[in-house]
Image (spheres, rainbow, N blue to C red):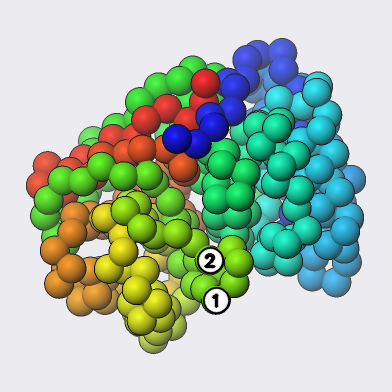
Amino acid sequence: MKIRPKRIKSGDTVGLVALSSSLKMEQLQTKIDFIESFGLHYKLGQTIGMSHGMLAGTDEERVEDLHTMVQDPAVKAIFCVCGGYGAGRLADKIDYQLIEENPKIIWGFSDITYLHTAVNEFADVVTFHGPMLSNGLEPLDALSAKMFQQLFTPIEMQYDEMISPLETLSGGIVRGELTGGNLNRLVSTLGTKFEFDARGKIVLLEDIGESLERIDGMMNQLRLARKLEQAAGFVIGQFTNLGEGETHEQVVEIMRDYLAPLQKPVVSGFMIGHCTPNIGIPLGVDAILDANEKVLRILPGVE
């Protein structure tokens, strides 16, 4: 069982870091306002406002920022403020023992999928897949914002059709550890030390800016790498900004082609990923996916 980080409380200090692409600084105030709305204080990492080509600082600067926040006893949680690209470049430079000895909430999504996968596996710590504190310059919608409450109180989450319409692609009920995230970043771990482990797990898949051809190609790569057959079930999030004229319904049919023949529980339609709302969830905890009733139940992510 993975280590669940301690919950946070009003008055705590949290760290804001950019471990992938550079943050557009005009977005920072919206993120700070959101943090302060929970009665939290914040500490800005050195990567906030930095740039090195397409990245928020060099690999060494970004790793140092993460390590500094992990080591700082005053910092109770670490929020990644933007995605983009670059987290995978840090994977072999991170001190996972340091994270395991100082387990803290690590929150983010998209490119941060690479970090989630590595920390879940090599530090044995639960992390959180959720929005980057704002939608660009716009504050988060009410439901996305509400999901941050799970960091203050250990609660079992239930996602059903009260939140969004869901579709069963393959029936059944399964319990397993929740893993996954951005499809592109999961595929990019294949063949490396940081290859994501699908064995007996419920795998979340979502993405943005990929064509149907690319999505099909990545699913085929997961099939040939035996990740699909190893998994216990699948949670299909949102696939947005597709190619011209392409629809989410076509993505669902691709998922059906690859996943339904496996006769494992598969449900699509979850508002998880590059969408509004973007429902934050813990990764590395046990969940129950009931594809017959279209319900996902997730154990608490904090202690």
The amino acid beneath tag 2 is Glu
Q: Is residue 154 left or right of residue 199?
A: right
Would you name the residue on which mark 1 appears? 191
Q: Is residue 162 visible?
A: yes
Q: Which mark is residue 158?
A: none
SS at circle 2: loop
- How far apart marks 1 and 2 lie (CA) works out to 6 Å
Please determine whether, in this image, residue 301 is positioned above or below residue 197: above
Q: Are marks 1 and 2 in contact (CB under 8 Å)?
A: yes
Splitting the image into 4 quarters, where does residue 52 fall? Answer: bottom right
Residue situated in front as seen by the camera: 297 or 40: 297
Please determine whether, in this image, residue 283 is positioned above or below residue 3: below
Q: Position of residue 66 (x, y in %)?
A: 78, 45
Q: Is residue 244 visible?
A: no
Residue situated in front as seen by the camera: 220 or 268: 220
SS at circle 1: loop
Residue situated in front as seen by the camera: 234 or 167: 234
Please determine whether, in this image, residue 5 is positioned above or below residue 92: above
- For the point 66% across and 37% down, which residue is it? 100
The amino acid beneath tag 1 is Gly
- For the point 31% across and 60% down, which residue is it? 231
| 10 Å crowding of disc 2: few (<14), some (14-19), many (20+) | some
Quadrant containing the N terminus is top left
- For the point 42% across and 27% down, which residue is it? 300
Splitting the image into 4 quarters, where does residue 261 fall? Answer: bottom left
- For the point 70% across and 46% down, which residue is it? 96
Would you name the residue on which mark 2 appears? 195
Q: Position of residue 131 (x, y in %)?
A: 55, 45
Q: Position of residue 193 (x, y in %)?
A: 60, 67
